[in-house]
Amino acid sequence: MRRSSLLAAAAGLAAGIVTVASIPATKLFPAPPAPAAAAAAGERWACPMMDFIGNRPGDCPVCGMKMTKVTAGELTREQQNRMGVSLSTVTSGPATAIIRAYGTVRYDDRTLQVVVPRVAGRIVKRHPAALHPGNLVAAGDPVVDLYSPEAFAAQGELAAAVKLADGHAIHALLERFTRWNLRPLADAVLQGGAPVDTVTILSPYAGTVVLGLEGEGMAGAKLPTVGAEVMADTPLLRLVEPRTFMVVVHVPEARAHWLREGQTVRLASDDRGELPDVAARVTWLAPELNAEIRAREVHLHLADPNGRLLVGSLVNARIEAALGPALEAAETPAMFTLVPKSAVLSTGVRNVAWRVAGRESDGRIRFELAPLALGPRLETANGTDAYIVRAGLKPGDEVATQGAFLIDSQAQLAGTPSLLFPLGATAAPAHSH
């Protein structure tokens, strides 16, 4: 019995082997399904739900959702509207820039005049011109009364010379009073008047009384005081023209060569706003940079006939600069290719723009990446800043302004060249979890 069972098992095994051997290999071992074709160049596949980007279509391995194709550089009309894409045309225009700087108003030290007595004495009275800084003084206004024994003695000498009819002495004494700016005293003696021991010092100049000028080392100046002894040529008053001022500003090193004397300057202040009636110009440029702040000192002189400004007012100065072919200050600006600032994407080292490469009849727009070599940024009066383009674009090209960053992000997702990845997918491998 046992023997027959073994024979039956062996026969069954042999039959199975024969049966299996007769089945084609393709039935027993079918080839694995062919993988989905890899995305074409410039395409990536992204999960709409998860942070996953793949190289081929199919289901997301994280959540199972169907992945959608991301194509770089091509936007449908719907995508343009949804992304808010706007375009601008690259132009050719003059290189005119606005340089902004800030400074405080001070008196114009070029107009400084000093009132001095030509004779020694002691101050016994102050007139209104010597009472307060900021007072307006007219030429011929009295400043102080001076008790002067020297002037009294000279009047006595003149009276004696007149009595003796000493023409030589009279001439010499008259010359002395003229040098002292006290000729009226001498004339009074010639007309028979008695000598006086107190003389009035008059201002030969008109202007505003100031105590000191910034940067002139005169901060310790004081107004005359009653009882003070003064020597000849001791300063009594300092006067400046009342409506002429200066402003000292510092221009950053990057714009230091955009300056030249005579440039027009427009001013504004916090309390007065725009000051179109205040005429200002660049009058002096420092021959070297301030090494501590990396800036160039610039002096602006201005006239304020309507009294809009006060000394100490903070003003915003906008200097209009025309740039020549070498990007230095010039009389007339040179012509350059200009691209709006909003069209430029920058890493600080690399600059690009997205240029329109073609338009389709269904409203689609194709963009291409344009690496740029840029010149300086020009700030314009109307706020539409632009870059000078040295290479990468030409006048007439259309570039994306609003929405350019989203177009670049799309290119990064698709693995094609973009701002951060000049070589595209070869330098930016797919990101997956």
Image (cartoon, rainbow, N blue to C red):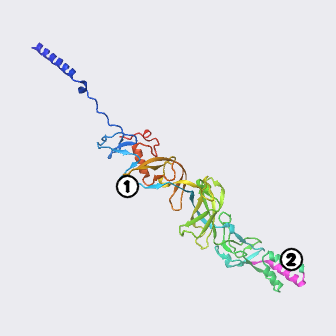
Residues at badges 2 and 1 in contact (C-beta under 8 Å)?
A: no
Q: Position of residue 109 (x, y in %)?
A: 67, 66
**Residue neighbourhood size for the residue with mark 1, other residues' Cα within 10 Å, grouped as few (<14), some (14–19), many (≥20):** few
Q: Quadrant of the N terminus?
A: top left
Q: Main secondary structure of the magenta part?
A: helix
Mark 2 or mark 1: whose residue is earlier in sequence: 1
Q: Quadrant of the C terminus?
A: top left
Residue 76 placement, left or right of 388? left
Q: Quadrant of residue 126?
A: bottom right
Q: In this picture, is 251 found above or below 44?
A: below
Near-viewer residue (47 or 399) = 399
- Residue type highlighted by circle 1: Asn
Please tell me the numbered disc located at residue 172: 2
Q: In this picture, is 260 found above or below 392?
A: below
Q: In this picture, is 403 found above or below 38?
A: below
Near-viewer residue (387 or 302) = 387
Point out the residue furthest to the top here.
Answer: 3
SS label for mark 1: helix
Q: Residue at the spot x=81%, y=79% of the render?
A: 152
Q: Is residue 263 magenta?
A: no
Q: Which residue is mark 1?
A: 81
Residue 414 placement, left or right of 207? left
Which region shows up in magenta? 146-166
- Residue type highlighted by circle 2: Ala
Q: In this picture, is 41 found above or below 273?
A: above
SS label for mark 2: helix
Q: Position of residue 154 (x, y in %)?
A: 83, 78
Q: Position of residue 245 (x, y in %)?
A: 63, 68
Tell me the mark number nearer the camera, choosing from 2 and 1. Answer: 1
Near-viewer residue (127 or 47) = 47
In 3D space, how far apart are the residues under numbered discs 2 and 1 (Cα atoms)?
96 Å
